[in-house]
Amino acid sequence: MCARVFKNAREAASLSGAVQIFFLSDDLLMSASNINALRPGFELDDYVIEKILGQGTFGITYQAFHRSSGLPFAIKEYFPREFCARARDDGVIASGSREDIADFHWGLERFLEEAKTLTLFDHPNVVKALRLFQAQGTAYLVMEYCDGQALDAILERDHTLTEPEIRAFLLPLLDGLEAVHAYGIVHRDIKPGNIFIRHDGQPILLDFGAARQALGNHSRSVTSLATRGYAALEQYATRGRLGPWTDVYGLSATLYRCIHGAKPSDALDRQMEDDLQPAAVAARGDYSAGLLRAIDAGLKLRHEQRLPSISEFRAVLSQQEPSRHPAGSAKTTTSGRAPGGRRPHPPRSTASGVLVLIGLLLVMGAVLWGMISSPAPPPAADLVEIELPTTSEAAPEPDAEADIAQADAAEIAPSEAELEALRQQAAEKERRLEEEKRQQEALQRKQAEDRAREEEKAQQALAEEQKRKQAEEKRRSEPVFVANPFQLPACPANQGVEYHNCWGSMEFGDQSYTGEFQHNAPNGWGTRSFPDGDKYSGEQKDGLRHGQGIYTKLNGTRYEGIWEKDNFKTPAKVTYPAPGSRRETQQTLDMRRLERISKDNPNNMSACPDRNWRHQCWGTAWRTFPENSGINEYSGEWLNNVPSGVGRIVFFSGDKYTGEVRNGKANGLGTYVYLSGDKYVGESADNLAHGRGYLQRSNGELQEGIWERDKLVRSVRVRP
């Protein structure tokens, strides 16, 4: 069993009560936006919403996955949008007048009753309801989910079906309908959109309409819901008599669409003028007589003349010889009664013929008797001319059967006044939906404009923030490139005068300095130039590099971070020149990022389940990796049951790695601590040092540069 997978908006519009309301189109019903639906990613009990499969006036159906098993399901939410609204906390609240609120709760009870009944079904051709629960102020029905396509999508593509194709889904579908009727339930909305064909060819009957129609009949503000062309005449009447014969009509209309390429005329239109071409005429020669006869017998307007049950439909379907009865005649049972229980009247034309035959026999007998008893014919004057009654003179009064049929039709069909009222209701509803559509379009335009303005403001704020950060970085990293940025007075030119709280230049052995002075020594911001071409820009203290600063080597390598008494203590960023040129394009080893990913669960992910599928979570595993990986233990982030993200790896060799992980291996920025005491900081690929980084030996030796598969292929000078 499975819930329906919708391919487009028109197909999804028929779900959960979004059937056509008399003459309203599916597109109009689907014009409402998805603002009432639960957002993707919303956690509903044990399920996570992924997307909307369909929505309508009665409810919304979602595709979701179970958090523990990861399996997909379809979840139907009771959401009659005329009587409720979505709250800010994503709950459902009844809204409107007191009657509307009462209708919401009344319909909720009907939804629960129908859903509970559906959970009792265990038939391979009826949609399987797995679970029913109440939450968020409403109710949810969980159904099994599978792939396939609806019959209406198949017909839209192929136009018509052959008889073998029809019988392939029809016979199992009849079994499912009989099981439904055995529970005393009428589907009420059989149509191609509610017949789902799985990939294995098995049909599934979807979307029962009992609760939906019950709410439509109960509420004065909701027009009775029926799908035009597939709904029987009794479904349009407020007190129409519904039963298995109602589903027979919808099934026959669906089969008519399969053989003819178009659905039948609507029952209301046929009540005014029945111009429906019988299936036996529309598809004569292409299909068996039994199939055509069953379709025509199931499309009778009067339910008394229609096939009353699926078993009767199946019996006619199995007949292969042409019917002896003329097309359109009512089926008579062995008890001599029509399906509706009324005894058929004999045709008056047949009785008139019998009377004429009796009269002729009497006259002929009299003539023969006279000839035998009298040897000679009587005189011509004694002959009496007997005028025999003709068929036209013996014709009875107008057929009473027509009167009975007309009375029955008037009994089950709405009156002209009711029809006019229904049309006005439909027109008013259409006008209201059009107005809602315009209002929602205006709201969407306003929301889009507001979002555009907010995005523009956010972009401006982001640009200003980036500009501010760039200016701050420039001020911190290269303050000396701006002459005297803090507007200190120039240091005196006379020798022997103390340089204090001023801006100037001085030579210190083989080094030169330009910047702030305090007590005759470099203190504050300034630039020091070294004889080998290296340069330091940043904070000084008592003539030493101390504080925030940048050390730039002649080859372009830059060290940015915190200095303490001329030692590089806390690196924040190391920038290397790219291979191929002297100064070379800058590429950065981000030390701040390295510090962040070295922490436990830096992204605050939820804990992984112990023995289930690990996905987007933080967890630990031991001895579950391939032997050639060399990994003994992993603790970190998982994606699709594979270590990916940020984590820690312990190898069988005793070496440890902390940093970025992809596809179960060290890939990206991270830190190796080897059993020997050596430490590597930098980029890795497939559990090896690969890229830019430095190796700090246990003996204090430092190797720095470009690595390929654990080998240093291009060195740069050891950092200061």
Image (cartoon, rainbow, N blue to C red):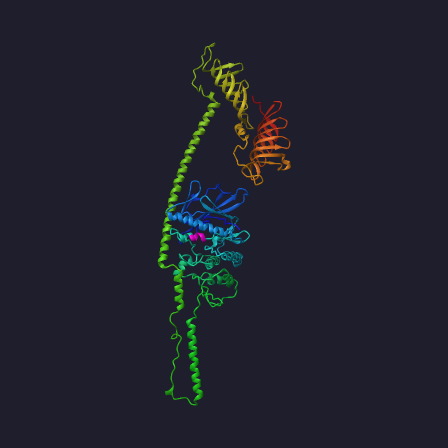
Residue 286 seen anywhere in this rendered image of the structure:
no
Q: Quadrant of the C terminus?
A: top right
409 in relation to 658, above or below: below
| Percent of width and height locating residue 633 | 61, 34
Residue 118 seen anywhere in this rendered image of the structure:
yes
Of residues 379 and 42, the one nearer the viewer is: 42
Principal secondary structure, stretch drawn in magenta: helix
Which residue is painted at 52% across and 34% down in the image? 604
Furthest residue in direction top, as rendered: 496
387 in relation to 556, above or below: below
For this view, does 247 lie left or right of residue 398?
right
| Percent of width and height locating residue 495 | 47, 10
Q: Is residue 237 magenta?
A: no
Of residues 87 and 228, the one nearer the viewer is: 87
Which residue is painted at 42% across and 31% down in the image? 461
Q: Write the start and end of the magenta stretch as one range.
A: 210-214
447 in relation to 583, above or below: below
For this view, does 596 lie left or right of residue 456?
right
Q: Is residue 213 magenta?
A: yes
| Percent of width and height locating residue 224 | 40, 54
Q: How many marks?
A: 0
